[in-house]
Amino acid sequence: KENGKVVYLLRGAYSSAGQLDFLYSEDLSYEDFAFFFDYLKKTCNGAVFCFDRINCNSLTHVYALKYGMQIDAKELLVSIPLAKEYSVWFMSLSKNVRQNVRTSYNRLDTDGRALAYKLYYGDEHPTKSTQKDIIQLFSKRMGEHLKRNSLLLRTAVYWLKLIHPMTKGLFENKNHIEGTVYIDNTIAAFFSGVYGPDNRMLIARLSINTDFKRYSPG
């Protein structure tokens, strides 16, 4: 928008995308960047440009600050390293977290619950039935966050998410990665994302089924 002569760019914080950026060649110069935004400034009647969220290691971030733009949101980006073996990862957790994990498994055993975890990546994709479960859980959780978890709202969100480009991209991308947790054949948690050439997993969507909160499925 141009009200107040401010144009907000790349609003990844308001979508599942998170961080966004422009597509540019590795040899992009500051002069090229400035030329582009000088043109946009004239087109937008001298508006001031503001980035909502951009990676601090990006050329766009460096050039935007040099150009005098404002970076509106400043947040700490966290990476979680994964060990090659579960036992190594488990022992890296704090004592309290390890006890919470044990408590969850003990509750599952005490209640006679059947737990099933499945990881999808590479050539293996979730079945249509599993995809449906994932979208329904995502819609249910969105309703709970909005405190308007009616059947009508969940149904509307489900159909909107079903046709959303992000949904298709996550399920069909060759670099996709998804994980699902089922308890007694009902989905209890999931995550969906992609992995890059540096083997980092970028998780765009995740939800838990609060009907199973006793077992901390997240």
Image (cartoon, grey):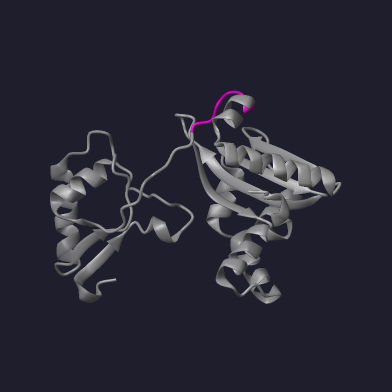
Q: Residue at x 66, y 64 (%)?
A: 140
Can residue 12 be seen by looking at this rendering?
yes
Left or right: where 108 falls relative to 36: right
| Residue located at (84% from left, 49% from top) | 111
* Residue under the point 58% across and 36% down: 95
Image quadrant assignment for residue 1: bottom left
Q: Residue at x 71, y 45 (%)?
A: 104
Q: How far from the left and from the top, in percent, is residue 117?
A: 72, 40
Q: Please give the count of numbered marks on the rendered protein.
A: 0
Residue range in magenta is: 81-86
Magenta segment includes 12: no
In the rendered view, would you say 104 is above or below 164? above
51 up-or-down from 217: above or below: below
Where residue 70 appears, x then y in whole percent?
A: 21, 57
Residue 13 place in picture, x, y as percent: 40, 57
Classified by dominant secondary structure, the portion drawn in magenta counts as loop
Corner quadrant of residue 126: top right
| Residue 113 in view (yes/no) | no
With 31 as the anchor, is 187 left or right in this view? right
Nearer to the camera, 218 or 193:
218
* Along the line of sight, the residue nearer the viewer: 115 or 187: 115
Q: Position of residue 131 (x, y in %)?
A: 69, 51
Whether the magenta-drawn stretch holds residue 84 is answered as: yes
Asked if 104 appears above or below 214 in the picture, the reply is above
